[in-house]
Each structure stands twice: as C-alpha cells, then as structure tokens.
Image: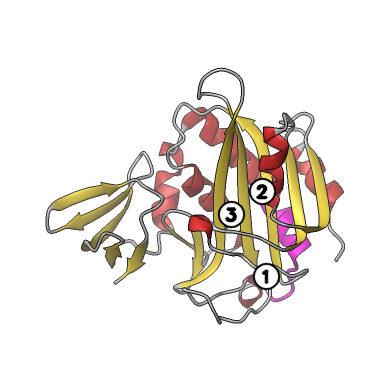
Amino acid sequence: MIWPAEAVWEGVAPLLPDFTVEILPEVDSTNTELMRRARAGRLEPVLLVGERQSAGRGRLGRQWHSAPGDSLTFSLGLPLAPADWSGLSLAVGVSLAESLHPRVQLKWPNDLWLQDRKLGGILIETASFGQGEAGRYAVIGMGLNIAPRAAQGLSTAPAWLQELLPALDAGQALERIAAPLMQAVQAFESLGFAPFQARFNARDALRDRAVTLSDGQAGTAHGASESGALLVHTAQGMQAVTSSEVSVRPA
C-alpha cells in the first residue's frame, strides 16, 4: 500500500498550521495512541493512520478489526474549542459521506451505512488541557470498510466501499476524505451543528422509519434537530434523544 501522505498534508496544512501526517504499520488503536499522546502533553494536530489495528474499538467498546488494505482506520487529533460539542459526530459523518459517494447514508449518531449495512463508524474522544472545558484536544477516529469482509460476529451486516467504487483503495479514500473533513471540523468549531442539519437529514438512514430505543421505547425517527439530537415520535410525544449511549435500531 502506497499512502498519499504528502498529498494529504498539502491539502490540510494550509487549514491547520503545524499539521502532520503519520502512517504506522501497526498500532493498538489510532484513537488510543492519540489519547495517550494528549495526556502526555502532546497536543499538536496530526492525522494518524494505522495500517493494522490490534485493538481497534468503536462506540460502547465494540471491537473494530482492521487488516492492511481491507479497511481504512485513522484518527484526526487537534485542539478544538466549539461553543457546543453537540452534533460533532454527525457533522463528521456528513463530511465523510459527501466525500465518498451519493449513496452513502448516515445512521445516528455515528455510523455510515449503505443499504442498511454498516460501511463505517466514527468514534470521538476528548482530553482536557488548560483551564475550563472550552478548549479540549479532540480525537476523531474513523473506521471504514474498503474491501469485502465477513459478517461473522457483527451485530450489523457489513458493507464496503468497493461495492460503490471498485477501483478505490484505502489510500485514495483517505485522500478524498482528509481536507474536506478538516474544513468540516473547523466549520463546526465556528458555527456548531446547525449548518450541517439539512445535509445530515438528507442522508439520514432512519428518517421516517420505525425505530426502537435501547430503553425499549418505540417510535418513528424524524431526523436530527439543530443541536444534533435525534427526534423520535413516541406514544409519549416527540422526544429529543441526545445520549450517544442510546442504541437506535430500525424496528
């Protein structure tokens, strides 16, 4: 695999001074590595790619297995100070989906879907530094299936990018994603989720569908609010679901 590290750097560096791109042949998890560095005081902006992850993880501690070439796993780490963090994973998802293909959909709060199968996942973590909560070091992790993968052991059947773009490899996918992702994160920092709301709802895989929440409530999903909450009409009325720990499944 030849990684377009210089091309990625050239696309992002004008937006983010002191930005670097780093490719590791193997790492436990790109998110874990950048969180380790942040806690040690290393807060520089970096895009870290792991060709192989031995302990990749998704939301709720789920494992994300990756092998060289079969998937793209990377994390973007940078200091970030939005007025409101709500909806960041949705804004990231919007950017990724728009960079990849018109048929890629978004499943609240942090998955990329293709025909009701999971194409990729987003995991965002933060580490505090300095005074107060405004400024934090954000680690935005992404796992994306590139080539076919087995469904064994997965709660949602997998999709892969080469179904849509047969010639695209992991390096080319990274080159498509990186600069628009940086622009989206900076726009979110300045303006919050509101500018992404309509774009998310246009790709919302759950919109107008029956869903079941992890607490057992059932209802109909009605897209994301201006703050990034999932709007679900239940027997008790319209509810704004805000916790990323709430599992939402099509009924």
Q: Is residue 220 left or right of residue 105?
A: left
In what quadrant of the picture does the C terminus appear? bottom left
Q: Compared with residue 189, is residue 109 higher up or lower down, i.e. above or below?
A: below
Question: Reading the chain from its start, which is encountered first: label 1 or label 2?
Answer: 2
Q: Which residue is mark 2?
A: 32
Q: CA distance from mark 1 to mark 2?
A: 22 Å
Q: Compared with residue 57, is residue 127 higher up or lower down, i.e. above or below?
A: above
* Residue 96, image x, y percentages: 58, 54
In what quadrant of the picture does the N terminus appear? bottom right
Q: CA distance from mark 1 to mark 3?
A: 14 Å
Residue range corresponding to the magenta coloring: 166-177
Q: Which mark is in front, 1 or 2?
A: 2
Q: Is residue 77 or residue 64 the one in the foreground?
A: 64
Amino acid under disc 1: Ile
Q: CA distance from mark 2 to mark 3?
A: 21 Å
Q: Residue at x 37, y 39 (%)?
A: 227
Q: Is residue 18 left or right of residue 189?
A: right
Question: Reading the chain from its start, which is encountered first: label 1 or label 3?
Answer: 3
* Residue 242, image x, y percentages: 34, 45
Q: Residue at x 55, y 27 (%)?
A: 81
Amino acid under disc 3: Leu
Element carrying mark 3: helix
Q: Which mark is in front, 2 or 3?
A: 2
Q: Which residue is mark 1?
A: 146
Amino acid under disc 2: Thr
Element carrying mark 1: loop
Q: Is residue 251 or residue 167 the one in the foreground?
A: 251
Q: Which corner quadrant of the image does residue 50 belong to?
A: bottom right
Q: Which mark is in front, 1 or 3?
A: 1
Q: Which residue is mark 3?
A: 96
Q: Is residue 160 or residue 103 the one in the foreground?
A: 160
